[in-house]
């Protein structure tokens, strides 16, 4: 049975809406402070260096470059297989970039609308800080967590033609995504629910991107592009 991307996207956005309502009405949920304190208690120099690396690769510019790279590889593979392409097929290869910018726009809007402040704990600045915009003083949802999901799910998708690489690619992506999410709490810049919201928002947009990819591909198969004589 083929996965229905639109159903997964809807479920993810409904879960995000529920979580957002709880955060707005309650604030930090029961157990969040305990999770923050636990993350702070794990701090050490070696782990901090790993978190800095995960923070950098899930930052906005590196994540966008990964998405552009993946889209370029998908386009190159498509060009190798087909002699005639239409705009829909080409647009379908851009699903990682579509997901990235869709999630980014929603992230900024939600941060401004909700205005949740970051935890009042010691912040560990990382070695390659990002440019700071006004909306970034708010924490909900986590942009790094969402960017990690989109960029590394996209990277894992490159293993699709190679069955032996699929499991290692998926496991590697999961480790980076979980590590980047944990790192946001570890550094003292996000609540655990900020990270969860970032994950849900990104999953929804990844599924929208994959739905568009499959839909555009289906249209192209039904109405194939004509080859010039």
Image (tube, helix red, strand yellow):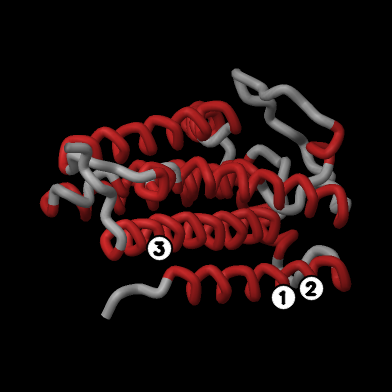
What residue is disc 1 on? 18
Given residues 213 and 177, the one toward you in this image is 213
What residue is disc 3 on? 215
- Between the residue at mark 3 and the residue at mark 1, the CA separation in whole angstroms equals 29 Å
Residue 88 image offset from top left, x and y in percent = 41, 49
Q: Are marks 1 and 2 in contact (CB under 8 Å)?
A: yes
Compare marks 3 and 2 and give the one earlier in the sequence: 2
Q: Which residue occupies 37% across, 47% down? A: 173
Taking 169 as reference, is 121 left or right? right
Is residue 45 visible in the rendered structure shown here?
Answer: no
User: How many other residues sit within 10 Å of disc 3, few (<14), some (14-19) or many (≥20)?
Assistant: some
Given residues 11 and 208, the one toward you in this image is 208
Taking 97 as reference, is 41 left or right? right
Q: Which residue occupies 77% across, 26% down? A: 132
Q: Which marked residue is nearer to the observer: mark 3 or mark 1? A: 3
Compare marks 3 and 1 and give the one earlier in the sequence: 1
- Describe the element under mark 2 as helix, strand or loop: helix
Is residue 222 visible in the rendered structure shown here?
Answer: yes
What residue is disc 2 on? 22
């Amino acid at each position: 049975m083929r996965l229905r991307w639109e159903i997964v996207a809807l479920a993810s956005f409904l879960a995000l809406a529920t979580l957002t309502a709880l955060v707005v009405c309650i604030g930090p949920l029961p157990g969040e402070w305990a999770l923050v304190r636990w993350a702070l208690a794990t701090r050490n120099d070696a782990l901090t260096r790993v978190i800095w690396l995960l923070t950098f690769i899930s930052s906005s510019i590196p994540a966008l470059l990964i998405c552009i790279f993946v889209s370029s590889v998908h386009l190159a593979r498509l060009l190798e297989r087909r002699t005639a392409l239409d705009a829909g097929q080409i647009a379908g290869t851009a699903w990682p970039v579509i997901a990235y910018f869709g999630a980014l726009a929603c992230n900024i809007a939600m941060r401004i609308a909700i205005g949740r402040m970051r935890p009042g704990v010691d912040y560990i600045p990382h070695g390659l800080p990002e440019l700071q915009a006004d909306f970034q003083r708010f924490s909900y949802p986590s942009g790094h967590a969402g960017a990690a999901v989109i960029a590394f799910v996209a990277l894992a998708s490159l293993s699709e033609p190679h069955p032996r690489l699929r499991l290692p690619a998926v496991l590697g992506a999961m480790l980076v995504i979980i590590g980047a999410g944990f790192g946001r709490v570890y550094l003292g810049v996000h609540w655990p629910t900020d990270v969860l919201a970032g994950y849900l928002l990104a999953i929804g947009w990844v599924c929208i991107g994959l739905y568009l990819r499959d839909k555009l591909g289906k249209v192209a198969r039904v109405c194939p592009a004509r080859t010039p004589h």
